[in-house]
Amino acid sequence: MKRAPFSIKCLVLTGLAAAHVSTSVAFGAPLRPDDPANTAKFEATVQKLEARGFHGVVAIAPTNGKVFYAGVGDAATQSGKPDKDTLVDIGSITKTMTAVAAMTLVDDGKLSVANRLSDFFSDVPEDKALITVHQLLTHSAGFPGAVGDDQEGLSKSVFLERAMNAELLFKPGSNYEYSNVGYSFVAAIIEQISGKGYEDYIREDVIGRRCDRAIGYETVYDPERSLLTQSGDNIASASWGGASHWALIGNGGLLSSAKDMICFRRTLLDGDIISPAAIELTQTPLVREGEGAPSHYGYGMVVEDHPNFGRIYWHNGGNGQFLANWTHYADHGFIVFTASNSPDFDADMAGLAIAETLFDLKILPDAETD
């Protein structure tokens, strides 16, 4: 689930930061990790993260150039401190992958965002028959947030039955309500069109075009190099309830490394996964995330025009045990990825701390001291 606390990021950036920076896009170039003169500043930021209780991984990457990676927490994995290859639960960032996977099929002429549920499934109830792929991808179909718990072990057939019988929250296309259900429907459509399992399609036809195939569920899971919870539980147990299933598939629970998350975003921007027209559509602010919200949802990502940072694309996801966040500061050519097992100072907050260093400004309040 994309966690509401990331909205705190928006409030912090527009509130606390407003006292320290102007209200127009006026920053100079952010610090680059491929400049050796900046290495000490990034390392100092990582030390501050650790001091504030962050455990996990961070990646700071210009869209081209050297990436700064760091792992924090000496017992965060079975083998010790995490690194750029450590597997983390990316939570609802899975939706970014699902949306891009759907757009590969659009590029191939096999899918249209105007297609309806009734084009793919039989016996669709009347209230859902005209729901479009566009509405599924933008959380505007009217489905509830979920029809099963992350630990339930839901089969595909049971998921589809529950989703088809779920009461819609509003007329499709008339409102916004964040929903895992819609993205699992998209995953089921991807499977039907491609003839492959969702995970195989992601690894072979999306990620595998240039990056390592270390994004997936069981096919990539390695407990020895995966982030643990604070209490020492592994991802399979804490995130999936033992095995991946259809309360998660397409909407959450994918595993990735920091290295592969950066590779995925760079590959996408380079046009090596989907066409420029498809990229533009995914990154269009299509549906406002609630009345008066500063952000819109595109396809699998949030789109914001921030008064200080300019255009930002981002998504996060968490389940109470793990949290991950990617943010692309598009006007400045920077991508930041963070993942954590530390609820008190999590990946969202770590991303803010990194932004403080990148842009040389004050965002977060000072740490409390005894």
Image: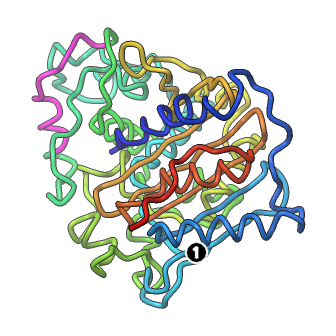
Whole-percent x and y of residue 334? 74, 46
Residue 161, magenta (yes or no):
yes
Q: Nearer the viewer, residue 364 or 86?
A: 364
Whole-percent x and y of residue 109? 59, 27
Q: Is residue 174 above or below residue 248?
A: above
**Magenta residues?**
159-172
What type is the residue that disc 1 sits on? Gly
Residue 61, magenta (yes or no):
no
Q: How is the image coloured?
A: rainbow
Judged from the image, the secondary structure of the residue bearing numbered disc 1 is: strand
Q: Is residue 236 above or below residue 133?
A: below
* Residue drawn 23% across the image and 71% down it: 242
On screen, residue 235 versus residue 32, left or right, reads left
**Label 1 neighbour load within 10 Å: few <14, some 14-19, many 20+:** many
On screen, residue 280 versus residue 368, left or right, reads right
On screen, residue 198 versus residue 102, left or right, reads left
* Residue drawn 56% across the image and 35% down it: 13
* Residue drawn 75% across the image and 40% down it: 271
Whole-percent x and y of residue 210? 71, 58
Residue occupied by mark 1: 71
* Residue drawn 32% across the image and 41% down it: 184
Residue 248 seen in the current view? yes
Q: Is residue 352 above or below residue 106?
A: below
Q: If the image is split into quadrants, where does the N terminus sit? A: top left
Residue projecting furthest to the bottom? 79
Residue 341 seen in the current view? no
Q: If the image is split into quadrants, where does the C terminus sit? A: bottom left
Whole-percent x and y of residue 156? 22, 49
Where, by quadrant of the figure, is residue 75 drawn? bottom left
